[in-house]
Amino acid sequence: MIIDRLFKAVESRGPVCVGLDTSSKLLPVSLAAERPLTEAVYEFNRRIIDATVDVVACYKVQIAYYEALGVEGLSCYRKTLQYAKGKGALVIGDIKRGDIAATGEMYAHAHLAGDFEADFVTVNPYMGFDAISPYLPYLREGGKGIFVLIRTSNPTAKDFQDLPSPDRSLFMRVAEQVEHWGEESRGECGYSMIGGVVGATDPQELVAVRKAFPTLFLLVPGYGAQGAGGKDVAAAFVRGNGAVVNASRSIIGAHKDRPDGDRRYPEHAREAVLAMRDDIRRWLK
Amino acid sequence: MIIDRLFKAVESRGPVCVGLDTSSKLLPVSLAAERPLTEAVYEFNRRIIDATVDVVACYKVQIAYYEALGVEGLSCYRKTLQYAKGKGALVIGDIKRGDIAATGEMYAHAHLAGDFEADFVTVNPYMGFDAISPYLPYLREGGKGIFVLIRTSNPTAKDFQDLPSPDRSLFMRVAEQVEHWGEESRGECGYSMIGGVVGATDPQELVAVRKAFPTLFLLVPGYGAQGAGGKDVAAAFVRGNGAVVNASRSIIGAHKDRPDGDRRYPEHAREAVLAMRDDIRRWLK
């Protein structure tokens, strides 16, 4: 089951999830100058993956950066997923789609079976269970998983997610549903194929979700450039597992402002992963 | 301003929004047999647009159907938007994206300026104002608009949208915020560039939103195949304007099971639009 693969990856390679949010601003100057933008992005991703694949749990590829580059960008997104999978890595398509019935089935097909096949995708729960159910056939077979947005890491997440609804916050209600939806698709590791996204920028929300739902696998954004540190994200873990922590700019942009960054960007990314892994592991004792 | 163009289109051509959710199942057999699937979809869309452009307010293109066909499908999505705009039609990209900060900016660029440029896009509000703000620069210039999901038309919309939060339903809270966010971008028609999606399958929710927010332009799904009729959607209108009503299968699938459907699918679509327009207008007196 895919969640067991992720569990084992965290165990053996650590809980870092590298976000391939590859903006043109992060590309080394020489790389960007030599070829069309989408080819430069792919080359960059490829070399980042090569340099980090043995020390990360998975990659999260933010599709928005590729959509912004149009049809060619989406071809680059597809190639990036394929390259990572070819290296034996697990990939999360960060698509945050959320739609219903036949439309939801189209998204599920596109991102868990079709051209853009990932191992996991992120899903937006606003439309209710109808936005989740189209993914279930892919989960039941054990090959795929999803992470449902529960409490995001941005400042205005509170606009709706923190509203009392009515006896507890909306995000806690969503977490409860996510736990419930996932009950029938648990792996041997005890976690289900339906995990949740809970940001670490408001640590008390993360603590509340983890305490109430100890068997929910968590995808935790907010580390690094968004402000959370090892101590904050440690609350997501249960005996050193059950979560992956995403960082993007602090890893794939680690070469910026380094004198040798243009040439040695893969090594800088690897060093940033190792430092982040150490920072998290220190708090997991 | 784009909302004034939509207002005038409703006034002169009626409130029907044709959903180009072009599933392969809806394609006439002969059309699908003659060429690659994405070319057949484009040809189908092109002929539906030609046959209906003078009697509809706008088109809504559901990107999920194109994503399911991969990179080629997204090329077809782009061509469909371009074709409709070339015919002078307004197009809504039904993308339901919702993401924050730099990521949100990528989506806004992709769908309001880049390869997939539409006139309006749909946006998911779960992540709060941070998921809306990336679109504002495009709105302030007057050229683009968005529709924020408020109360959707699917059965489990109630899972979260109807929760008391705490003094009114979550969707009413979202509607209130949508109204507030749009205050600074009103057109001459009085409506703002930030409208809302409110389904007609639960008419009392639609009545509640319209009553509380009379100057919110509404995109209303749920007509036809999803069960709502002219009487239900009439509640969305204020003096015959202020809303567009989307239908997809009942229009672009109107040729199915007709003896001459394979050949005359554009005419069947046009007849379905005219019947729907009459059905709605009857209740707007």
Image (spheres, coloured by chain):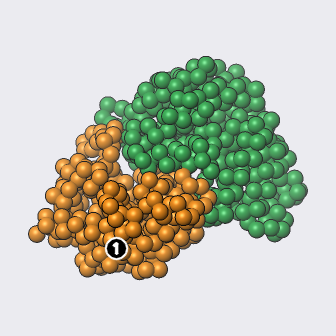
Chain colours: A green, B orange
- B39 up-or-down from A243: above or below: below
- A113 up-or-down from B190: above or below: above
- SS class, disc 1: helix
Mark 1 is surrounded, within 10 Å at the Cα level, by few (under 14), some (14 to 19) or many (20 or more) other residues, namely: many
Give the image quarter of residue A36: bottom right
Which residue is disc 1 drawn over? B52
Q: What residue type is labelled 1?
A: Thr
The C terminus of chain A lies in which quarter of the figure?
top right
Question: Can residue B142 be seen in this snapshot?
Answer: no
Is B9 in front, or is A137? A137
Give the percent coordinates (x, y) of residue B4: 33, 77
Residue found at x 43% / y 61%: B28
- Please give the chain letter of the residue carrying mark 1: B
Give the percent coordinates (x, y) of residue A207: 52, 29
Q: Residue furthest left?
A: B285
The N terminus of chain A lies in which quarter of the figure?
top right
- Give the side of residue B207 with respect to residue A14, left or right: left
Give the image quarter of residue B2: bottom left
- B208 up-or-down from A190: above or below: below
Is B18 in front, or is A154? B18
- A186 up-or-down from A32: above or below: above
